[in-house]
Image (cartoon, grey):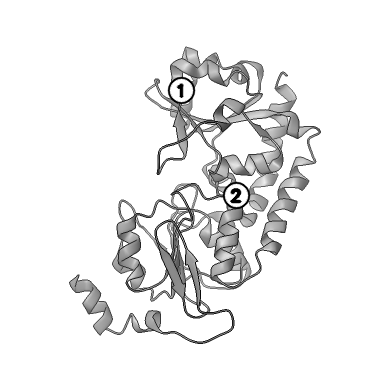
Amino acid sequence: MQWFKRLFLAGLLLPMLASASESGYPRTLVTGLGSAVINAPPKRIVALGAGAEDIVLQLGIVPVGIEAHYWGGDRQGYLPWFRQEVERRNAPLPVALNLSPETDIEAILRLQPDLIVATQSGMTQQVFDHLSWFVPVVAWPQRPWLTTPQEQITLLAQALNKDPQPLLSDLDDALKQAAAQIPHLDSYTFAYIRGGTNGSTLAAYVAGDPRVDTLLHMGLKMLPSLAKQSVRFGSFSTFIGLENADQLNDADLVFTWYLNERDQQSIEAQPLFRSIRAFREGGYVPLMDTSLVVAMGYGTPLSVRWALPQFMPILKEAIAHAKR
């Protein structure tokens, strides 16, 4: 722990330890990893995981640091809708932290945050405990990687003493307006799956995962058999197995994504995969644009408003060909 002492002696941690008596503070938020006691309105926020940076930005604060997102983002690690919004505000871009393969605690603390948020993430107890020694950390509320967009908005608004309703309404309006473009959208069932490139695996994302909840919010109905599935702690998908691909045959629409065309060809060449009814009859929706996959998977008001103009034509085409 010598680096903790070095940071303290260098004076980098003093802003984190400061407290003030201001309206609405102090406030305590209880999460799945522990409590965060926020003594004063946060000004230097580090946003980790998926989507928190969008919500913090829309609540009025440009984070000082975010987790870098190279998959779906640019070479600097910024996702397009986030970068565009920061630049629209004429604000400096936050530091993009490369936290793979493990969380760099020193790099986070060098930004002198007064709050760290990781509401939709896989943050571990160990990382939470290390960071919480210096600064309040708002982690995921119940399970890692299974925080809905609405839960993120509500939790982050509580942390910043803001009203969540404008963002909740913005998200609701964006998705309902998009859904209104397709008559009877709520009569279609769907599954969101991921096939393995080794040709033998098949998994389905579950409710609570934002990529699923965004489609549910639009009115689509999750395949009932998948809605009943439970997942192990820390996971956001349930294993089906390619040999059980026929379990998806009651889904009118099947969504998936691919890293590249080679993976797409490998998976789609499997006879059992090709036997899925939606694949055979036109209700198959393969997504290849990584930014679009991430945007719909974040499910934040900022990301979905960026994504819907691209996503809706794809969905309309699939529904036009899907057989009921």
- Whole-percent x, y for residue 256 in the image: 54, 32
Quarter of image, res 254: top right
Left or right position of 200 against 6 = right
Identify the residue at image location x=43%, y=66%: 35
Label 2 sits on what residue type? Answer: Gly
How crowded is the residue under tag 1: few (<14 C-alpha within 10 Å), some, or many (20+)?
A: many
- Whole-percent x, y for residue 208 in the image: 54, 44
Mark 2 or mark 1: whose residue is earlier in sequence: 1
Q: Which residue is mark 2?
A: 299
Secondary structure under the numbered disc 2 in the rendered image: loop
Left or right position of 257 against 102 = right
Q: Residue furthest bottom?
A: 21
Left or right position of 304 against 256 = right
- Whole-percent x, y for residue 276 in the image: 56, 17
Where is 41 relative to 285, above or below? below
- Whole-percent x, y for residue 195 in the image: 46, 27
How crowded is the residue under tag 2: few (<14 C-alpha within 10 Å), some, or many (20+)?
A: many
Q: Which numbered marker is on residue 267?
A: 1
Secondary structure under the numbered disc 1 in the rendered image: helix
